Amino acid sequence: MKADASEIVVKTIVLLLYAFLLAPLVMVVATSFGSDAVESFPPRDFSLIWYAKALAEPSFMQGLKTSLWIAAAATLIATPLGAAAAFGIHRGRFPGRNVLQALLLAPLLVPGLVTGIALLVAFTALDVGTAPERLLFGHALVILPYSIRTTLASLVRLDPALEEAAGLFGASRLQTLVYVTLPSIAQGIFAGALFGFILSFDEAALSLFLIDVDTVTLPIAIMSHIEYSIDPSVTALSSMMIMATLLLMILIERLFGLRRLLGA
Amino acid sequence: MSEAAPGAASLEPPRGRSVLGDLADLFPRSGFLVTVPATLLVFFGLVLPVGYLLLLSFNPARAGVTDLTSDITFANYLRLVGDAYYWRILGRTLWIAAVVTVLSTTLGFLLAVSLWQSNPRWKGLLTVIVLAPLLVSIVARTFGWIIILGSKGIINKLLLSLGLPALQVMYTDVAVIIGLVHVLLPYAVLTILASLDRLDATLPEAAKTLGANGAVVLRDIIFPLALPGIVASGTIVFSLAMSSYVTPAMMGAANSSVITTVIYQQFVVNFNWHFGAVLVAILLAASLLTILFTLSALARFGRRFGEAL
């Protein structure tokens, strides 16, 4: 097939778009390996000095610890809750399952800022929860829909003949669930959990309203650091976050397919 | 999706097997029970708090008071309507969201078509690149834009070395638009791709065989068929652009507010929660109207297209 002029124009635009999508990420990673005190591109030399500085900054390390355990705990709460709910919606025989599904996916539609404020007002009015508890609750709520979605997608794809066969061979329903159904959808559930972990780890708008002085998540620690000074230790830290996220994304793409996970 | 798998119905539970078997029998039929924990989380974490917040907007504004009273008033709404400052904020919010929507949807369409037609070998990698802005921390992403667009950033260094005057892009509305297009482009691509995936992948080839060139194929064949996805993408991008907070807060000018940054101010700086709740109500209503508008537009396309949402 011969390429015409319009095709070349479109191809050029698409290439530029890929460059646009990658530019800020690549720049952060590239500049993080220099030793200059002001971030510069291209870096004049190769050095890991800013990585060492970033890892020695107490507010970053505290933030990293907080973000890691909140993301892990929120994922551990949201994954079984979401998977169970997806089972109920897919296999249940009760009325109003469509409405329930819409309700359970609602945290996706409400902006993080609004969810954060609503939770702040509710927690304050009731005077309950410490900052870590509030963060954990909010994060579990926000990532719940992803767990529901991946489990639902896996259940829809599951060949019913497999379960039928297990039943014919004398497996009880529980045995079928444990030995046939769950192993078949485990990859999807795991991909959803990874995705939820990334989302929680990177969350900023919701957390703003649930933190206190002693409990600050990493994105917010970086945000407040940037307000005072932009130094290359932030570049090194951001670079680590970018590389970790890209690695996890590739893993999810391999395990499950990113597009299916995002519901498109 | 809500329909049970056909096989599940024909799965006859083996009778009188074991206690465990009977216990498991409960599971598929009373599926409602297993949805209860998640439902409680969403009900107490989202429905009640947002409802409470909206009710708060009808109470007289009193600093530090968070309890609901039966003292219903529209004073907070009247204050908003009567103040030109808030109309300007709303205007700027809608304007930025509109520009971001047009850019993201147009560029997202081109990107989606190229991804749709890409070699399966590279599809996975290209998908990761397209979706990266969505998942990489907003803070790290914004920091990348500071390196590129900042006053001593790469673009300005390039301009200066060419003897051109430096540009002030960072901390302007232009920076906010760039940042928002960057993060919302993946949503546009995903939504439009969902529409494209329903089409026969050999369609463009067939059109070309019949003599259409690339532009004609895009404009007269793919575009009309992808229209439901494009409309849906516009809605999603518009409501996300309106309600994003971190990008305008980190990349915009301090004196150039949008509705979300004003909401943050009302709640965190001014402690005027009742008035802040009015702004939240406006934001949610605007998102809802956008979605309803699109649903009715898609309904006009006919039932066949409605599935694209």
Image: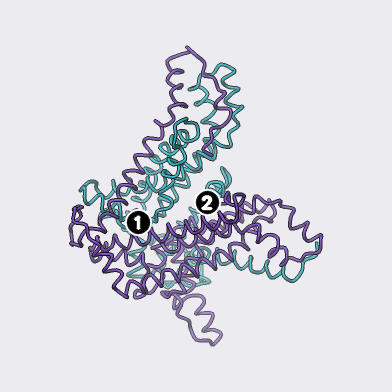
Chain colours: A cyan, B purple
Which residue lies under the disc numbered 2? A247
Left or right of A88, for residue B208: right
What residue do we see at 56% from left, 43% from top? A256
Q: Amino acid under label 2?
A: Leu
Q: Residue furthest top?
A: B16
Left or right of B118, for residue B75: left
Q: Quadrant of residue B118?
A: bottom right
Which residue lies under the disc numbered 1? A114
Q: Position of residue B176 (x, y in %)?
A: 44, 70
Task: Please report contact status of discs 1 and 2: CB closer than 8 Å, yes or no.
Answer: no
Nearest the viewer among B297 and A50 is B297
Q: Quadrant of residue A166?
A: top right
- Quadrant in which the N terminus of chain A is drawn: bottom right
- Examine the rendered structure and indicate whether residue B124 appears above or below residue A91: below
Q: Position of residue A60 (x, y in %)?
A: 35, 58
First-in-chain label (1 vs 2): 1
Q: Secondary structure at mark 2?
A: helix
